[in-house]
């Protein structure tokens, strides 16, 4: 497997790609877009259940995939590898705050990324933490279990979880480490040869149970705040424990059944642009929906999500997304080429 594969982490695209993981990434980024569109529509039981269900697995599995394609390196190599991520985070976080009237642009926003850009900050931090954790022996499993325990305990600390995305850094890091461990041990290959019936049962039962429960769960699964901000320590702890359990079950199930699909794999190459830019398209589209008083039922929400994804992929035919994601690096590279 090639480490430089483009896995929503700012790394360079590899010459050789993996159709399985590209397919998985496109499925997951589609879930992320749909989940963000559903933020605008909780007026039906089905929309609420779909919102809760997506938040119960999409980010943990994305974190797992990013961990899978992150190698242990020296701190200097890690620092150099993160520079492009830092550039993307800094520039597009600021632009989004200017673009979105509901988000205030302040110095504090450099420490508290807006919209979905918390993930880029977490990736930078996780890459450095990974360098000090063993992966090839039983200590790795113990480290993963310990990190899940720390993720549960961290919620009891009443601090602002959005500062440096500390709450999500701690809560989601076990999935990142699990992905790195899976790479070293061939865990995904072993999952892929297990019985698929069990996976289908998992992916049938959990959404049904979430639908029957009919309550708001997504904010708890977001892991962005201390427990006291989400109904109290007891309920916050129980929901995070539930989140860990069902995300692991569904992650296993999805890893098992995702196909190596050529079309999905091709679309999966656009993960990073979709992730960075879909917030802008959502704002514009939902303003149009509100202005025209268009429906926000589940079928229309699905349609809006498809429009957002297709529009970003289509614009990629005319726009150099790599240059947009890293404009400073692109300009420097351009002037260096002129000097030569």
Image: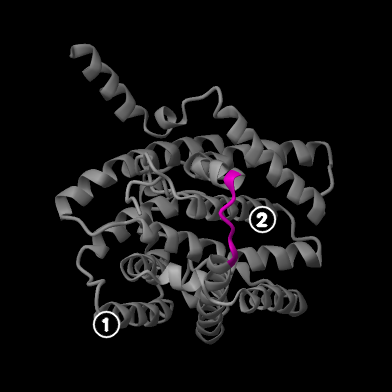
Residue drawn where x is 68% and y is 78% of the image: 201
Say if 170 sits above or below 68 in the image: below
Work out whether residue 112 can be spotted.
yes
- Indicate the quadrant where residue 221 lies: bottom right
Q: How is the image coloured?
A: one colour
Where 290 falls versus 249 (above or below)? above
Residue 335 point in image, percent of width and height? 25, 17
Which secondary structure lies at badge 1? helix
Does the magenta segment cover residue 148? Answer: no
Pointers 2 and 1 in contact (CB under 8 A)?
no
Give the total number of marks visible in the rendering: 2
The residue under label 1 is 138
Report the mark closest to the observer, 2 or 1.
Answer: 1
Q: Which residue is mark 2?
A: 39
In the displayed structure, does residue 129 sit left or right of residue 250? Answer: left
Residue 252 drawn at (x, y percent): 53, 72
Mark 2 crowd level (few <14, some 14–19, many ≥20, 10 Å Cα): few
Q: Nearer the viewer, residue 149 or 311?
A: 311
Q: Mark 2 and mark 1: span between their CA atoms?
A: 41 Å
Residue 234, which numbered label? none
Secondary structure at numbered mark 2: helix
Task: Indicate the quadrant containing the N terminus: top left, top right, bottom left or bottom right.
Answer: bottom left
Q: In front: 189, or 180?
A: 189
Q: Residue at x 39, y 36 (%)?
A: 91
Q: Residue 13 appears in which quarter of the rendering?
A: top left
Query: Which of the two residues, 298 or 252, is positioned nearer the viewer here?
Result: 252
Residue at the outermost front position: 193
Q: Which residue is drawn at the image coordinates 47% and 35% (left, top)?
A: 95
Residues drawn in magenta: 257-262
Quadrant of the drawing holding the C terminus: top left
Q: Earlier in the sequence, mark 2 or mark 1?
A: 2
Instruction: Tell whether 207 sits left or right of 133.
Output: right
């Amino acid at each position: 497997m090639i480490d430089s594969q483009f896995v929503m982490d700012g790394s360079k695209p590899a010459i050789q790609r993996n159709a399985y993981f590209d397919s998985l990434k496109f499925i997951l980024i589609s879930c992320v877009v749909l989940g963000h569109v559903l933020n605008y529509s909780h007026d039906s039981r089905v929309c609420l259940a779909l919102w809760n269900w997506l938040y119960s697995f999409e980010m943990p599995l994305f974190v797992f995939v990013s961990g899978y394609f992150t190698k242990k390196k020296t701190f200097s190599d890690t620092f150099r590898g993160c520079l492009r991520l830092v550039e993307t985070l800094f520039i597009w976080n600021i632009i989004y705050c200017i673009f979105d009237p509901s988000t205030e642009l302040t110095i504090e926003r450099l420490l508290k990324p807006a919209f979905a850009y918390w993930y880029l900050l977490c990736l930078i931090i996780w890459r450095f933490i990974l360098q000090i954790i063993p992966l090839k022996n039983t200590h790795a499993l113990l480290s993963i279990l310990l990190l899940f325990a720390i993720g549960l305990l961290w919620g009891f600390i009443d601090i602002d979880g959005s500062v440096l995305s500390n709450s999500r850094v701690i809560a989601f890091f076990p999935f990142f480490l699990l992905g790195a461990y899976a790479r070293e041990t061939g865990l995904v290959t072993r999952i892929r040869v297990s019985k698929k019936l069990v996976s289908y049962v998992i992916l049938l039962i959990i959404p049904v149970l979430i639908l029957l429960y009919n309550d708001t769960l997504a904010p708890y699964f977001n892991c962005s705040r201390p427990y006291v901000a989400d109904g109290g320590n007891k309920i916050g702890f129980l929901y995070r424990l539930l989140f860990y359990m069902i995300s692991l079950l569904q992650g296993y199930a999805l890893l098992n059944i995702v196909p190596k699909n050529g079309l999905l794999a091709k679309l999966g190459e656009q993960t990073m642009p979709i992730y960075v830019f879909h917030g802008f398209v959502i704002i514009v589209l939902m303003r149009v929906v509100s202005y025209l008083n268009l429906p926000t039922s589940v079928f229309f929400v699905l349609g809006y999500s498809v429009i957002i994804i297709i529009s970003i992929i289509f614009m990629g035919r005319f726009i150099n997304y790599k240059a947009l994601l890293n404009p400073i690096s692109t300009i420097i590279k351009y002037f260096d080429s002129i000097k030569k």
